[in-house]
């Protein structure tokens, strides 16, 4: 089996107590060829990342700084042993066991006494490495303090009792990212996560949280080992997706491979939301990647400053190149793109691989790199806090007073012979404030306080990409708003320079409802307008609500409004017209009545039975005026009076005409020799007949009003959007009897007049009565279908029109010829003219 090559940085002083360290410096592992014919070569680590070497140096700096402080850990010197895990789990586990065993560097006596090989480990930075390594370390009670492993699963103290970290858990990270997503109203989101515990645990929480307000357009898992087919498939999904926002949970190494392919295929127009694992990854935040990843918003570890660190970083120098495994040598070669030659190496092109020879005289101060940049210390600051947390735990351990200790019988640990689990006891209870005024402590799950910076990838004036802090997420605050963002500081990598809109379907506005598309996520829907009479008053309403019976939806279907009340009003054009015609008809009737009264002694008036004419004109005036009771908003009074006045006035009118017709016929018969019929139908009988006919109609009306009177009603049968205010008849039989009785009298009157039409003109009104009754009957026969088929206020208008038409027919047919003679032909309104015309008629006969 191939052996694993471990990269170890030598320490100049072992120290009294050794701290272990696990880092990711190389991002690629080259597997040896297994031919089974020869001993395989060692696994090789490649792709050294210069910027991450800063974290290694920060740990060394912190240890040396502590050693120089004589008041802190007095008479105790700390040492270190640091390993590169090469982003490969077997290598990481081998490094962890090497720290556990001590590789023979620690000398113990025959009684197995003395300090352990390492009392605590700073790292591992990767979650899935930490999960595996912590299970081993927990068996021996060795505390691990990670500065970058964020998987929420590591908060489980039953499974990982000796694991702590100076970075918040993913549970809080996802909260921060969700707050950013909700802040900008993004509901259609893509998700990419590494196919390991870190990515999958974060993805699980993300899915749960997003489901409360949005949808995931796609979910892709980035392989932990290079798989071109899978990478191509993920890139194709991103390219085809309509989601504008993509959330990424992945380590720097895994995302770098995917990002390279995204840039190669020139995929732009996506807003990336980065987890803290890569939000400050300077190797990715470069100019050549800016078109695809510019404007990335991410949560990041709190930035801090470490006085004196920059000077220390610039002091690094490869004093010894004897050991090829020395990290400083690898760092120097990567930074200056050169190659150190060992004494056994031959100078040739194959050994240099196109690079020049390193001399060791290169000046690190002349190169600007992420390694020496201390303006944005995040993971390195966490390393610094981790070292100091362990140091404080050790300081508290040696400060223990016998008899007041935390262990059995209130004993204290012996600094010369203590166990890692005793350090773990103090480490869990660490609580101090560092030089920046920041409190360093662990909660009951071993997690750091949940405070994140919100960062944004922008271009500086010189064209370089900078990772700028634009806000803060503080889970520890007692205020309701935990996310603070300075909107003016954000760069959006879109033409509009505004936040993108990431939705599958636009929000349904009030007046519509959401209708989910079959087979698609709930965020993909159509907006269906509410039906008439239904409304939705909220954005993205899932249903429309029916309005109450007396309400109807407005044009926008956004609210229920009172239905429009419709009735034949005095204010609308139709009402004004009918009112005007009514008043004109009544006025005309009064004028005719006045003319007849003025000329009541003239032959024309006398010959036409002046008393019945006066009564007929009065009834016609009432017929005209009763129309007014049909106009205006119906009430109990108008509903009862309109049909009573209409029925009685029309019966009075028809009765008068009928009696006049009978009088005409009898008067003609009375002129025959031996005929004395007129004595049987004198004035008293005429009055009695009119009264009798009217009385019968009055009985019908009274019976109708007593049994089932008409009343105001709201009719919604014809128009959904309107309420027609009308008079409910109460009893259709009553209304039918009223009209039927009028029709009966009209038919009798018409028949009698028709039979008497050929009587001499001097005495005869029959032809005028015949014509008036013909108009009257025609109007009311056509009234019935028109009344039934006319909806709303037009029903009333038809009834009013019928009343007016029939009234005008009677008035004009019977009285206009007589008024014409009285006013314009006075010579014909004399007894002589009347007698001469009578004689002429008789002669013609």
Image (cartoon, grey):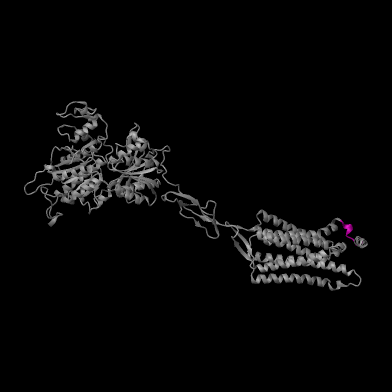
Q: State the image quarter where residue 804 is shown.
A: bottom right
Residue 774 in percent (x, y) is at 77, 61
Q: Quadrant of the N terminus?
A: top left
Q: Nearer the viewer, residue 369 or 159?
A: 159
Residues drawn in magenta:
825-832
Residue 12 in percent (x, y) is at 14, 37
Tell how many labels: 0
Is 827 within the magenta? yes
Q: Quadrant of the C terminus?
A: bottom right
Residue 457 in percent (x, y) is at 34, 38
Q: Residue at x 76, y 64 (%)?
A: 619
- Can see residue 722? yes
Residue 763 versus residue 325 in the image, above or below: below
Q: State the image quarter where residue 700 is shown.
A: bottom right
Q: State the image quarter where residue 289 is shown.
A: top left
Q: Report whether 774 appears left or right of 25.
A: right
């Amino acid at each position: 089996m191939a052996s694993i090559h471990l990269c170890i940085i030598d320490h100049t002083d072992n120290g009294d107590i050794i701290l272990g360290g696990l880092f990711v410096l190389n991002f690629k592992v080259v597997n040896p060829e297994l031919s089974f014919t020869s001993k395989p070569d060692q696994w090789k680590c490649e792709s050294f990342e210069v910027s991450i070497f800063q974290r290694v140096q920060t740990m060394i700096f912190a240890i040396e700084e502590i050693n120089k402080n004589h008041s802190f850990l007095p008479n105790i010197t700390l040492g270190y042993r640091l390993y590169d895990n090469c982003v490969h789990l077997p290598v990481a586990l081998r490094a962890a066991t090497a720290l556990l065993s001590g590789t023979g560097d620690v000398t113990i006596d025959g009684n197995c006494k003395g300090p352990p090989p390492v009392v605590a480990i700073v790292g591992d930075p990767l979650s899935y490495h930490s999960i595996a390594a912590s299970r081993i370390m927990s068996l021996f009670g060795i505390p691990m303090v990670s500065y970058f492993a964020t998987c929420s699963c590591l908060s489980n103290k039953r499974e990982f009792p000796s694991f702590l970290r100076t970075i918040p858990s993913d549970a809080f990270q996802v909260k921060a990212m969700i707050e950013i997503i909700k802040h900008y109203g993004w509901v259609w989101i893509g998700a990419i996560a590494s196919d390991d515990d870190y990515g999958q645990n974060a993805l699980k929480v993300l899915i749960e949280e997003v489901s409360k307000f949005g949808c995931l357009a796609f979910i892709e898992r980035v392989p932990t080992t290079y798989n071109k087919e899978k990478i191509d498939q993920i890139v194709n999904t991103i390219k085809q997706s309509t989601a504008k926002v993509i959330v990424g949970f992945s380590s720097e190494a895994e995302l770098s491979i995917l990002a390279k392919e995204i840039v190669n295929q020139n995929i732009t127009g996506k807003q990336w939301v980065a987890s803290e694992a890569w939000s400050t990854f300077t190797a990715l935040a470069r100019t050549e990647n800016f078109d695809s990843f510019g404007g990335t918003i991410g949560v990041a570890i709190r930035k801090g400053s470490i006085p004196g660190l920059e000077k220390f970083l610039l002091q690094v120098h490869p004093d010894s190149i004897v050991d090829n495994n020395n990290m400083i040598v690898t760092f120097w070669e990567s930074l200056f793109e050169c190659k150190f030659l060992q004494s056994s190496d031959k100078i040739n092109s194959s050994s240099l691989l196109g690079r020049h020879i390193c001399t060791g005289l290169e000046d690190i101060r002349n190169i600007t790199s992420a390694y020496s940049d201390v303006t944005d210390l995040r993971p390195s600051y966490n390393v610094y806090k981790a070292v100091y947390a362990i140091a404080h735990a050790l300081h508290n351990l040696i400060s223990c007073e016998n008899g007041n200790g935390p262990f059995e019988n209130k004993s204290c640990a012996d600094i010369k012979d203590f166990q890692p689990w005793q350090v773990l006891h103090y480490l869990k209870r660490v609580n101090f404030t560092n030089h920046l005024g920041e409190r360093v402590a662990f909660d009951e799950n071993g997690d750091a306080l949940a405070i994140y910076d919100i960062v944004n990838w922008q271009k500086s004036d010189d064209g370089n990409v900078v990772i700028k802090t634009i806000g803060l997420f503080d889970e520890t605050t007692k205020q309701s708003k935990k996310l603070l963002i300075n909107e003016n500081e954000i760069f959006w990598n879109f033409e509009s320079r505004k936040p993108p809109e990431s939705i599958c379907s636009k929000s349904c506005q009030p007046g519509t409802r959401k209708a989910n598309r079959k087979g698609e996520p709930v965020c993909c829907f159509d907006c269906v307008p509410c039906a008439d009479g239904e409304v939705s008053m909220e954005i993205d309403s899932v249903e429309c609500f029916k309005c109450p019976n007396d309400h109807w939806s407005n044009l926008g279907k956004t609210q229920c409004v009172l239905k429009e009340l419709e009735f034949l009003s005095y204010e609308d054009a139709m009402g004004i017209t009918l009112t005007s015609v009514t008043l004109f008809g009544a006025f005309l009737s009064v004028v005719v009545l006045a003319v007849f009264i003025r000329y009541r002694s003239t032959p024309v008036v006398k010959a036409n039975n002046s008393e019945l004419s006066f009564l007929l004109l009065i009834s016609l005036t009432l017929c005209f005026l009763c129309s007014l009771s049909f106009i205006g908003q119906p009430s109990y009074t108008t509903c009862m009076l309109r049909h009573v006045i209409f029925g009685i006035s029309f019966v009075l009118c028809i009765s008068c005409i009928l009696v006049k017709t009978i009088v005409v016929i009898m008067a003609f018969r009375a002129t025959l020799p031996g005929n004395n019929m007129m004595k049987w139908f004198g004035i008293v009988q005429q009055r009695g007949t009119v009264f009798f006919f009217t009385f019968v109609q009055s009985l019908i009306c009274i019976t109708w009003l007593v049994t089932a009177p008409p009343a105001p009603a709201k009719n919604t049968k014809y128009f959904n959007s309107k309420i027609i205010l009308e008079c409910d008849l109460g009893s259709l039989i009553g209304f039918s009897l009223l009209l039927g009785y009028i029709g009966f009298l009209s038919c009798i009157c018409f028949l009698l007049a028709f039979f008497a039409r050929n009587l001499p003109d001097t005495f005869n009104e029959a032809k005028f009565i015949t014509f008036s009754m013909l108009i009257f009957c025609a109007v009311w026969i056509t009234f019935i279908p028109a009344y039934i088929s006319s909806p709303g206020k037009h029903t009333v208008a038809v009834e009013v029109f019928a009343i007016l038409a029939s009234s005008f027919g009677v008035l004009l047919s019977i009285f206009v010829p007589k008024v014409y003679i009285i006013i314009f032909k006075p010579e014909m309104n004399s007894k002589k003219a009347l007698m001469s015309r009578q004689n002429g008629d008789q002669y013609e006969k």
